[in-house]
Amino acid sequence: MRSLSRKTAYRKSTLRNLATSLILFERITTTTAKAKELKPVVEHLINSARPGDLNGRRKLLAYLFDENAVKKTIDELLPRYANTPSGFIKTYRKGPRLGDAADMTIIELQKANVLKEENANKETVVESIDKPKRKSSK
């Protein structure tokens, strides 16, 4: 586990805050190191709450800071990822931050239709959209 230049209590609190924000907003921008630490934490939270029973709800309440995040996980995210064992978090490299040149990453929860397309058939053909014709500049 990365120390993230923090003591243990502050590091755990930072990860809890990031996990709560990711569940509530479904897309956040953070440093690459924090995103790499956050991804397995959120996947484990969603998988541990998978049965949707009282025990799963209590595990989420013990970790997340906001009750709305727990409700959203139980009501929206668990049905969305019911048939997906893992891999429902996607990260994108954004580039360096202007102030201190830290590598930034966008981390987001994937939508259900994206997961179905990826898992269904790898050989599916996507119809191309015709681009409008441009006028020639003569």
Image (spheres, rainbow, N blue to C red):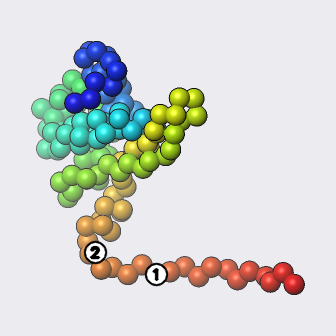
Query: Please, is residue 37 above or below residue 82 in the view?
Result: above
Q: Residues within 10 Å of mark 2 (few under 14, many from 20)?
A: few
Query: Please, is residue 99 above or below residue 28 in the view?
Result: above
Q: Quadrant of the C terminus?
A: bottom right
The spot of residue 72 in percent (x, y) is: 33, 39
The spot of residue 99 in percent (x, y) is: 57, 29
Residue at the (24%, 36%) spot, across then down: 41
Image quadrant where residue 133 sits:
bottom right
Residue at the (25%, 53%) spot, across then down: 87
Q: Residues within 10 Å of mark 1 (few under 14, many from 20)?
A: few
Q: Quadrant of the N terminus?
A: top left
State the residue position of label 2.
122
The amino acid sitting under disc 2 is Lys
Going by the picture, which residue comes out furthest to the right? 138
Residue at the (24%, 26%) spot, across then down: 63
What label sits on residue 127 in the rendered view?
Answer: 1
| Image side of residue 84 versus residue 67, left or right | left
Going by the picture, which residue comes out furthest to the front? 101
Secondary structure of residue under mark 1: loop
Which of these two is toward me, 114 or 96?
Answer: 96
Image quadrant where residue 26 sits:
top left
Residue at the (54%, 79%) spot, across then down: 129
The amino acid sitting under disc 1 is Glu
Give the foreground label among 2 and 1. 2
For the question of whether residue 69 can be seen, the reply is no
Image quadrant where residue 132 sits:
bottom right
Query: Please, is residue 117 above or below residue 105 in the view?
Result: below
- Counting labels gives 2
